[in-house]
Amino acid sequence: MPLTDTKIRNARPGEKPIKMYDERGLFLQVTPSGGRWWRFKYSFDAKEKLLSLGTYPDVSLKDARTRRDESRKLLADGIDPGANRKAIKASRQDSAANSFEIVAREWYAKNAPDWARSHGDKIIRLMERDMFPWIGGRPIADINAPELLTVLKRIEKRGAVETAHRALSNCGQVFRFAIVTNRATRDPTGDLRGALSKSNGDHFAAITEPTEVAKLLRTLDGYEGTFVVMCALRIAPYLFVRPGELRQAQWADINLDKGEWRYLVSKTQTDHIVPLATQAVTILRDLHALTGNGRYVFPSARSYERPMSDNAILAAMRRMGISNSEMTTHGFRAMARTILDEILNVRADLIEHQLAHAVRDVNGRAYNRTAHLPERRKMMQKWADYLDELKAGAVNP
C-alpha cells in the first residue's frame, strides 16, 4: 500500500530503524530518535544504491515522490542520480570559488604591484563600491552583457559617466583574466560598446586631490628610463603647459639666468611667458649638459634633430602603472588650475593667464603675455614649493 500523510504522522520510532515503503523505490526511514528520512532505492550498473531525498516534514510526501520521479528519469537516460548530485554539488562549489569578486581580487593582486598605489586604490574602491555588491557573488562565467550593463547604468545614473566607463574597462580586464585562467569562456564587455553615454570629449583625466598628487609625484620620481624623459616627467607638473609645447620646447626660447621661457602658443598663436621656478631651472640646467648643444630641450631618443614623440611621456607614465583613466599629460594643467584656486587661493585671472587662456583685462584688451608677470612669478614659485612639500610629506593635504 502506498504511504499517506496520516500513516507517516502516526508512525512511532522503535528500537531499530523502521522502513515504511511507498512505491517505485521510495521509502521513509524512521530512526529510533524519531527522525524521518526519505530514501530512494535503485540499481545502477547492477549495484544496489540509496539516495537521500530529504527529511519529513520539510520534504512532504508529494515532494518526495517528485524527487523520486526525477531520479527515475535520470536512470532512464543512463545517468546515476547519486553521481549526478555529487557533480552538481561540485559545480556549485566551483562556481562559488570562481565568483566575479574572487576573480577580480585575484586579478587586482596580480597587477597591483606594477601599478602606482593611487591607481590600484582607485580600482579596488570602485569594485567594492560599484560592482561587488551587485555581481560580486555571481559565477563570473554566468555574467552576461545585459546583467553587467544594469550595474554600469546604476553608476551612470548618478552622473558618474567617467566612472562607468572606467568600471567597464576594468571589468573587461577581469573577464579576460578569467578566460586565460580557464574560469570563463568570453568577455561580455565587448557587447557593450556604445551602450553607455559618451563621456565629455574635452575631458582629460587628472589627479587633483593633494594626497593623490603626492603619491603621483613620488611615482614620477621613481622613473628609471632615459634621462631626457625623466627630466620631462619631473618638470611637467611644475610648468603645466600643453604637452605638445613641452615636448617641442627649444633652448633658444629659454633664459635660465632670468628663469624664463618665452614661446608661441600653438593653440592660439599668441606669445606666452612661463616663469621658471628654481626647481624647474635646476632640472633644465642638468639637462642642458646633455641636450644644450641641440635645438630641442627634449629631443627624440632616435634623433636630436626632432623633439620627443607625442607618446614618450604618456608611455612612461603607463609603464609606471598610471592609467589613462587616472592621469594624462594634459592633466597637469587641470591639477594646477584646481589646487592653485581651491587650496593655494591664487587669483583666478593669474591662473588663467599662466594657462595661456584668453583673458581680457578691465579695459577690454585681449590676452597680454606680460600681464601680471611679477605676480605670476611668485605664483609659479609658490606652486613648485607646494609640490615639493607635498612630495616630501611636509604638508598635511
Image: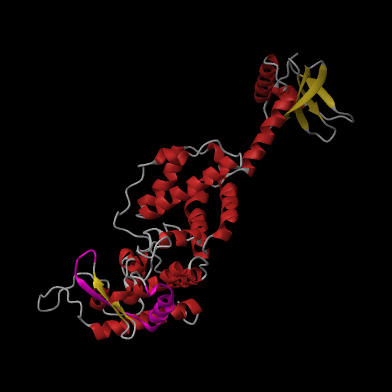
Q: Residue at x 27, y 71 (%)?
A: 355
Q: Nearer the viewer, residue 294 or 296?
A: 294
User: Which corner quadrant holds the N terminus?
Assistant: top right
- Residue lying furthest left: 363
Displayed quadrant of residue 55: top right
Asked if the stretch drawn in magenta spans residue 233, the answer is: no
Q: Is residue 364 left or right of residue 208?
A: left
Question: Where in the figure is residue 271, as x and y percent of width and height?
Answer: 20, 73
| Residue 226 in sight from this viewpoint | yes
Displayed quadrant of residue 346: bottom left
Q: Residue at x 57, y 43 (%)?
A: 178
Q: Residue at x 67, y 27 (%)?
A: 60
Q: Is residue 113 left or right of residue 324?
A: right
Q: Nearer the viewer, residue 186 or 317?
A: 317
Vertical placement of residue 74 versus 380, above or below = above
| Residue 139 in sight from this viewpoint | no
**Residues in magenta?**
266-293
Question: Where in the figure is residue 135, as x and y percent of width and height?
Answer: 52, 45
Q: Residue at x 80, y 27 (%)?
A: 29
Q: Is residue 369 left or right of residue 182?
A: left
Q: Nearer the viewer, residue 24 or 62?
A: 24
**Count of marks placed on residues:** 0
Question: Where in the figure is residue 23, as x and y percent of width and height?
Answer: 73, 15
Vertical placement of residue 167 versus 276, above or below = above
Asked if the stretch drawn in magenta spans residue 287, the answer is: yes
